[in-house]
Image (cartoon, grey):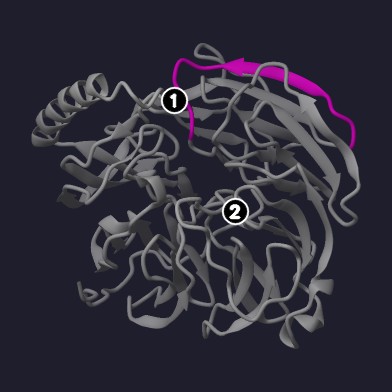
């Protein structure tokens, strides 16, 4: 699909510090600049609660007084097809009695409407809703996934919505389509679904396309939709989104996996690459077929990048991205420290006041490390109430907010000592990472979007 010619933008302002304009927030740190409530419930500190049609795991993003969100809504034809598929699956499950293992719960590839929503921040009312496409995905997803998982990125009034294989769509602030692209179909390991979010850097919208087939990293001019550059990558499924690091006047897009590779965001040239064992490498290393790579996104703070390296069973590392040596070779000295056994799983870690917080694989336990040295403050403190979490950590007002899948939220006081300070509950399930906008906390559940604010 060729890009549609761009039209005049209606909103040219850049994101303010209080905005949360893309995945990880305004400074890509998951840290807000306000102080949202520490206590809430269905009858306490809920400014508003609105239903969201369909199903999506993308996080809300906010620019000015507008929230942007994606969702996938099953059509009537899709509902009928899903019922038939479920009946056939149940029959196959009865016939497959020799495996001794339960069948993986999956969502079938039935017809969906892919929608982009704009909501009023003050009230939650829908300002506009656009159906980007109505189609049947080429493959299904894990039952915990969705067909609307990547988070929107907003810049200069442009709203960039990625549905992965189902299309890339850019709108203006009034919901008029500016340009779009179809990059083909991914073949995802285990048909577990797609998840990587787009990133904005050096005026480009960068899309990671790593799957079991031919893989690449591609950049489009964010204003026009013209392809700026494309670089081939070793094949293998990645669910992690790229990180962005600034070195002087240069922005680097960093992709993690069996190798961690930094690309110049303006040109796509490789700045440096490190293998999963911490050694220099001239070429990215292929992900073993069927294994899949990291899910957590790398975080950059204080000239350091913190990531899970070497695949989903790899290690937690601190990487020096600000070193002048970044442009002069592929050096293992770039790794400042590393830990095994403390690798984040799905949740992206965060850094606040020099402390790196990590949810250990499997959930329910939190670790905290000195970000500069890697020295552990604590490594496996069990949370009081949260057992499983897919949403990443966020922080504001001196607290780390932890989202449980079952609607339980736990707050931990920021600092070197572990201290759980509050447990809150809502009547929904939550897998999307929250957004923090000033003193507001936006929580996307399976059925509703909540705005938490003092009342």
- Label at residue 48: 1
Give x and y (percent) for residue 376. Answer: 89, 42
- Look at the image and tell me whether residue 69 can be seen: no
> Which quarter of the picture shows residue 362?
top right
Q: Residue at x 87, y 57 (%)?
A: 372
User: Magenta segment, principal secondary structure?
Assistant: loop
Is residue 422 magenta-colored? yes
* Tag 2 secondary structure: loop
Residue furthest out toward the top? 43
Quadrant containing the N terminus is bottom left
Please rate how many residues cluster around mark 2, counting C-alpha atoms within 10 Å: few if below 14, some from 14 to 19, many from 20: many
- Report, in whole angstroms, how far the alpha carbon at label 2 lies from the one at label 1: 30 Å
Q: Nearer the viewer, residue 381 or 238?
A: 238
**Residue that mark 2 sits on:** 297
Give the side of residue 98 with respect to residue 412, left or right.
left
* Tag 1 secondary structure: strand
Give the side of residue 289 with respect to residue 319, left or right.
left
The mark lying in front, picked from 2 and 1, is: 2
> Which quarter of the picture shows residue 409?
top right
Give x and y (percent) for residue 142. Answer: 37, 37
Of mark 2 and mark 1, the one earlier in the sequence is 1
Q: Nearer the viewer, residue 226 or 335?
A: 335
Is residue 384 magenta-colored? no
Total marks in image: 2
Give x and y (percent) for residue 220. Answer: 39, 76
- Look at the image and tell me whether residue 256 can be seen: yes
Give x and y (percent) for residue 171. Answer: 30, 61
**Range covered by the magenta-colored residues:** 416-431
């Amino acid at each position: 699909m060729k890009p549609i010619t761009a039209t005049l933008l209606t909103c040219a302002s850049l994101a303010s510090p209080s905005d949360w304009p893309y995945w990880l927030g305004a400074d890509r740190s998951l840290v807000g600049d306000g102080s949202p409530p520490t206590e809430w419930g269905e009858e306490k500190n809920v400014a508003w609660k609105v239903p969201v049609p369909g199903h999506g795991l993308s996080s809300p993003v906010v620019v000015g007084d507008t929230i942007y969100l994606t969702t996938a809504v099953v059509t009537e034809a899709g509902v009928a097809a899903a019922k038939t598929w479920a009946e056939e699956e149940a029959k196959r499950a009865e016939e497959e009695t020799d495996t001794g293992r339960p069948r993986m719960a999956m969502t079938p590839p039935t017809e969906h409407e892919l929608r982009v929503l704009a909501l009023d921040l003050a009230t939650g009312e829908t300002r506009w809703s656009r159906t980007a496409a109505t189609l049947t995905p080429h493959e299904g997803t894990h039952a915990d996934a969705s067909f609307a998982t990547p988070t929107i990125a907003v810049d200069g009034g442009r709203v960039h919505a990625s549905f992965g294989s189902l299309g890339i769509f850019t709108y203006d602030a009034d919901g008029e389509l500016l340009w779009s692209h179809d990059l083909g179909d991914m073949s995802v390991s285990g048909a577990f679904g797609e998840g990587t979010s787009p990133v904005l850097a050096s005026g480009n919208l960068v899309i990671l396309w790593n799957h079991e087939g031919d893989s690449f990293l591609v950049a489009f001019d964010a204003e026009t939709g013209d392809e700026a550059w494309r670089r081939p990558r070793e094949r293998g499924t990645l669910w992690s989104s790229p990180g962005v690091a600034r070195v002087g006047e240069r922005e680097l897009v960093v992709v993690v996996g069996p190798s961690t590779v930094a690309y110049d965001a303006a040109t796509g040239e490789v700045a440096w690459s490190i293998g999963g064992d911490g050694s220099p490498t001239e070429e990215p290393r292929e992900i073993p077929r069927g294994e899949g790579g990291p899910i957590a996104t790398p975080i950059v703070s204080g000239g350091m990048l913190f990531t899970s390296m070497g695949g989903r069973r790899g290690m937690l590392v601190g990487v020096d991205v600000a070193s002048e040596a970044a442009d002069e070779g592929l050096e293992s000295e770039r790794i400042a420290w590393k830990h095994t056994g403390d690798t984040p799983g799905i949740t992206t870690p965060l850094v606040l006041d020099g402390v790196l917080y990590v949810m250990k694989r499997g959930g329910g336990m939190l670790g905290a490390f000195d970000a500069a040295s890697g020295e552990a403050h604590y490594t496996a403190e069990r949370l009081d109430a949260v057992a499983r979490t897919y949403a990443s950590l966020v922080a504001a007002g001196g607290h780390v907010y932890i989202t449980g899948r079952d609607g339980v939220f736990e707050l931990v006081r920021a600092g070197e000592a572990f201290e759980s300070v509050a447990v809150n509950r809502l009547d929904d399930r939550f897998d999307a990472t929250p957004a923090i906008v000033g003193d507001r906390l936006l929580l996307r559940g399976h059925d509703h979007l909540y705005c938490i604010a003092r009342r």
